[in-house]
Amino acid sequence: MTSPNARAAAPATDAAAALLAGLVSRGVRHIVVSPGSRSQALALVAAELERAGLVELHVRIDERVAGFTALGIARETGMPAVVVCTSGTAVANLVPAALEAHHAGVPLLLLTADRPPELRGVGANQTTRQPGLFRSATRYEADLAVPEAVDDTGAGEQSAALDLVAAEALAASLGEGARAAGPVHLNVPFREPLAGAAPSWLAARAASRAVEATAADDADVSGALYQGGGGIGVADVAPDTEAAHVVTCGPRTIVVAGADAGPAAEQFAHDGGFPLVAEIVSGARFGRQVVHGYRALLNDPALGGRIERVVVFGRPTLSREVTRLLMRDDVEVLAVRGPGEPVNLNGATVAVDAVRSTGAADRAWLGEWMRASRDAAVDLSPPAPDADGLASAVPHERLGAINAEVGVMRAPVDRAALVDALWRATWPHDRLVFGSSRIVRVADELLGGKKVRVHSNRGLAGIDGTIATATGVALASQVDERPGVTRLLLGDLAFLHDMGALLLPPGEPEPRLQVVVGNDGGGTIFDGLEVASVAGDDAMTRVQYTPQAARLEQLALAFGWEYHRCTTRVALDQVLTASTGGRQLIEVPLPR
Ligand SMILES: Cc1ncc(C[n+]2csc(CCOP(=O)(O)OP(=O)(O)O)c2C)c(N)n1
Ligand SMILES: [Mg+2]
């Protein structure tokens, strides 16, 4: 076989080519590579596929960052990204993203290079037991055979077998044969030579079914039948008349939309005339039936206390009030299956694939909620300037108005203003990502309805991988020159936890990303939990709040991010809406 760069063919590379071409030809568009020797065949084939314009390649030094970047890409697109890494501890760094993907129902394809089986457990360098490392989280896993054949034509048995593996792996990651999408682990052992020339058939093979795969992505989003999980990927509503559970209007019902519920929850609430309690991370907080200040209303015996039935979409995690409601055994709970772990907090929740409402809506019930909701809504916007006062010819009136205006401009940003500024700056073509911290709960408590795409890792609500996830969301949302900015709002500890994700090698695709850090010097979420009343002040600070005094500006500069420190609402609004299109770190100091 001749090759353009005169390198000899190698079984490792031909196998890597068959596997990756099999995935790309079926619609995989993103590959995230971390460097290593054992994985070089996969990495080099990925680079070749990028050169041919068939994939977007992302390189990340840290495998944990790579894993979460892939998770973000998959959250945004609904298609898995491939992660390639070398053997040893590299593989273990993928565990956090794999667990989050498992619990949230996000597809992920982990390709981990390994030594051949005879070198495992005999003291060989960088070799551990990789097969099974993700077992509790995977939809499918395989320890592949060591490639032994060179395949000049691409028609060999080895290539055919790997194409089949690719098909099975992709289908499994998308949830075929399982309840939901999730991680797939292919452990890929390689023998030396670890790489050779890319086979001549690679690009053509990878491009072969691409058109067919794209057509399948265009899911039908019409119809009056709803399934959960529209928050991940593109498909909002999956019409399937057979699977629908019919909900007869009558019993006093509310709809609860948790993480990744998606627009289907709103549509169902709208059609059935049900009040909609939609978490800020649900992607369903919009429309006329959104209940403002839902925590207090759920606690109100006259409203929450009279609920007879709850229809749940997605996975609610942000409030105790909803958790308590879902634990009640005097309330009928229907959980619409979504990508994430099914909810069954009262032990008697009925899981359904889809729901449809029938009968006349209970307008009186809805009216009660909507009136209470209107009273509970908070207006967070800064007061409008006093135009008359400013234009007044009477000096003391004018001065008063000017002073008031200066006061507004100088007012420090608090958490409420911060979440309001973010929510207002975000439009449908933008993306909003929330980290796990106190701030997402403030946002959940205070913000009104708006139809924007929201992401957050609520599968396990970790404070790890947040920046990487948002980077993946940004990169995937801006393909094909699509407009929009991704904004991530997170706490300082979550930010520092994922600092490694700030590192982007030169020449990498640049995310349009604003990372907004609410910096209160440590983990203040604990100040509002029971632990604060149990712990002494010193211990509370030392082991729960865990103070930090890192200089965020210097981190930003070290990693090539534009840096802004915003202490006033005016300054914050300005920075948020004047995105320069690259990577910006926006620090907002907050009191503990
Ligand atoms: C990987 C991981 N480690 C620890 C935790 C526990 N935890 C939850 S919130 C939190 C502190 C978050 O602090 P910060 O990001 O500053 O947000 P804040 O609450 O201060 O707004 C910690 C340590 C977690 N969720 N995930
Ligand atoms: Mg904090």
Image (tube, helix red, strand yellow):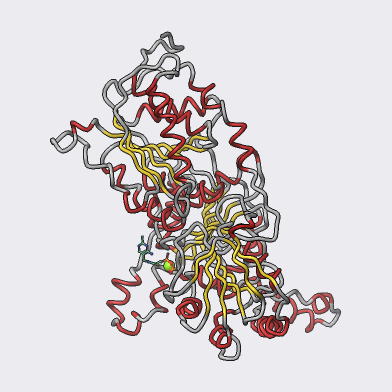
Question: Where is residue 569, by image quadrant?
Answer: bottom right
Residue 437: image location, x then y, percent: 45, 67
Picture layout, residue 60 above or below residue 283: above
Picture layout, residue 7 above or below residue 332: above
Residue 279: image location, x then y, percent: 56, 69
Identify the residue shown where x is 58% and y is 31%: 210
Residue 571: image location, x then y, percent: 62, 63
Is residue 528 shown left or right of residue 570?
A: left
Front in this rendered view, residue 92 or 586: 92
* Labels in figure, total: 0
Residue 218: image location, x then y, percent: 65, 44
Question: Where is residue 454, by image quadrant?
Answer: bottom right
The quadrant of the rendering that contains the N terminus is top left
Is residue 370 shown left or right of residue 505?
A: right
The quadrant of the rendering that contains the C terminus is bottom left
* Direction right: furthest residue: 393
Front in this rendered view, residue 114 or 407: 114
Determine the quadrant in which ligand 2 lies: bottom left
